[in-house]
Structures are given as structure tokens and as C-alpha cells.
Image (spheres, grey):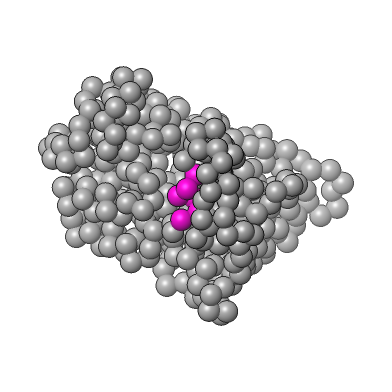
Amino acid sequence: MKTMKVGIIGCGKISGIYMENCHRFEVLDLVAVADLDRNRAEEQAAAYNVPNVYTVDEILADPEIDLIINLTIPAVHADVCLRALEAGKHVYVEKPLAVTREEGQAVLETAKRKGLLVGCAPETFFGSGIQTALKVVEDGVIGKPVAATAFMMSRGHEHWHPDPEFYYAAGGGPMFDMGPYYLTALVQLLGPIKAIAGMTGKAMEQRTITSEKKRGQSIPVEIPTHVAGLLQFEQGAIGTLITSFDVFGGSVLPPIEVYGTHGTLQVPDPNTFGGPVRYRLLGDEEWTEVPLLPGYQENTRGIGVADMAYAVGSGRAHRASGELAYHVLEAMWAFHDSSDEQTFYKMDSTCQRPAALPENLPLYTLDQ
């Protein structure tokens, strides 16, 4: 097993869990961090025992670094990925892969030209919750999947996030913020998407920040904040997905349910790694809770990076792949395009359904 030297660009809120988990996978050696705010980079390096603090140019120029984890804001995801690839480094990026489909295609084409791998969050589908649900589907417990529903119902982030502006700017909104979790989980369970029909809306033109750092400041809402639609999967199932920042009184809708010819499967929140997983078959009066497969139930962001590092060494396909992330990116835009053009959107891309994780491996080991 070849250990890969890793550098992180972007030391914001999400970086801590990546740094923590990089230290847990023997295949990863986190050696450097970089951020436009050097003080923030130094604080994170000290907190997580990372030996080097670099500028972005320095981290990309270091010949010892094999792989870059790109945790920058979505608006520059593609630019940083392209720079890392051109520097000869594999790259793993926080979701989404890019803001536009054209940027996403450029990242994949550059990686192919350079003979490098691209990976992308979310990797929550590696968790025991989604993996257990996948086994229920693959074992045929609920019969042939014929439909699914998925709901992300929220009031938005201005009441808790210290810097919520980008959630309401281009590249933000509920679909681009949370849609990747739900769409990736649905593709893991049901396979790639064939066509989408969507409608979008916006509850208000301005939002007021109520979190402490910028309390009282007003945010212009530049994007749809309620996105709803239908998905047709290549294998025939029909899905319904709603992502919203316009739900101000709470919701009791389940995160994901899959409906089969023999019964119904309840899938846990795809923004988490754990459970519960339940099913109810035709004729049952009660739900049956499924024991979770051994594996990852706590926040293990960074596991997709480790999986990609194993793939570099073995030549196998990695699960949180650039192709999967691009398929999800196209799907997110499809909801908006379908709404704007009042027509069905036929997907141009497809992807491989990610392989299930091997069972009975020690934690933080992904291959035999």
C-alpha cells in the first residue's frame, strides 16, 4: 500500500473534519495546508498537527505532494482543481464539483489528459446507513424499486452560519448546497438518472442575517430557494425530490424513501453516515429496523479521499468519482433548466453506480 502525501487548500469550517480523518487512514499522509488567510491556515495546522503551512502557489509547487483536497468556496472549485491537475496532482474537491457544467467538463477532461484522478464529495454514502440501505435494495428485500421520494426541507442558513451570503448567490441555493447529498444517495441506490422535470421558486428577494457575526445585515437572494421535481432513472424508477430554504415552520417528511414491489425502505439522512434503516413489507403492520452493517457511522468526511488513494495504487475504480459528481452536477442544473424552459431535461451524462464497500474490513481500511 503506497501512502499518498496530501495537501489541503482551504481551511474553513469544513476543513477540521477532513484533517482529523486524514490522520486516521494509513494510506493518507497530510503534510501541508494553505489558505488565502494565512492565520486561519496556521490555526488549523496547529490544531491538527500538520507540519507545513504554505501559500496556494507553494502547495501546488511542492513535488512531494501527490494529492490536493480542495475545500475552497464553490465559486473557485473548478479553478483550484484545474491548477492542481496542471501541477500533476490528483484532486479531491468538496461538493459541488464546479458551479457550471462547462467547468465540470473542463476538470474531467484535464484529469483525463493528465492521467490523474478526480474525486468529489459527498462521500456520506460510504457510511453504514446508506450502505445498509443499499444491501437491502440489492438483496431484493423490497422487490424491484419502482419509485423514491427525497426531501430536504429547511429555513436556510442565515440564522446559524457566520457567513451565509454565498448560499444565496450563484452556485448556492438548496439544490447546490444539499442536493449533492440526496442525488448521490439516490444514484447509489437506484443508479444513474435519465431525465428530469423541475420547478423552482423563491420566497423572498432579501434575507436578514440573524447569526451573531453579521446580525441584521441583509442578503440579496439571487437564486431559487425552493426547487422541486421528478427524476426518471435509467432502470425505470421514478423519483420525487424537493430541496428548500423556504420551510419556516419545520417538516416531518422523511429524508428518503424507496418504494419497491414488495415494500418500502426508509433511508437515513444522506448528510450523515449512520442510520436508522427501516423497511415495511406488504402486509406488515410495523416497520422492521435493519441492523447497520459494520463500518462508518460517525462523521468520516475524507473517506472518499482515502478510497481514491487506494484506487491510485490498485488501478480499481474509486467510488466518489468525478464522473459521479459531474452526473450530479448536471442533474442539479437540470432541475433549474427544466423549470426555466418548461420542458423535460434529458441527461447527457451517465456514470457507474458506485460499488458497495467491502464488508468485514478493519475500520480505516478500504481494500483487502
Q: Residue at x 27, y 50 (%)?
A: 81
Q: Residue at x 52, y 68 (%)?
A: 336
Magenta-drawn stretch contains 334: no
**Residue 183: x and y, percent?**
53, 56
Q: Which one is in front, 318 or 253? A: 253
Q: Residue at x 36, y 20 (%)?
A: 47
Q: Which residues are magenta?
A: 164-169
Q: Describe residue 184's horizontal placement relative to residue 120 as left or right.
A: right
Q: Describe residue 270's horizontal placement relative to residue 78 as left or right.
A: right
Q: Which one is in front, 90 or 354? A: 90
**Residue 9: x and y, percent?**
29, 39
> Chief secondary structure of the magenta span?
helix
**Residue 178: x and y, percent?**
53, 50
**Residue 117: x and y, percent?**
27, 50
In the picture shown, does residue 363 fall above or below 337? above
Whether residue 310 is visible to the viewer of this picture, yes or no, is: no
Whether residue 77 is visible to the viewer of this picture, yes or no, is: yes
Q: Which one is in front, 366 or 203? A: 203
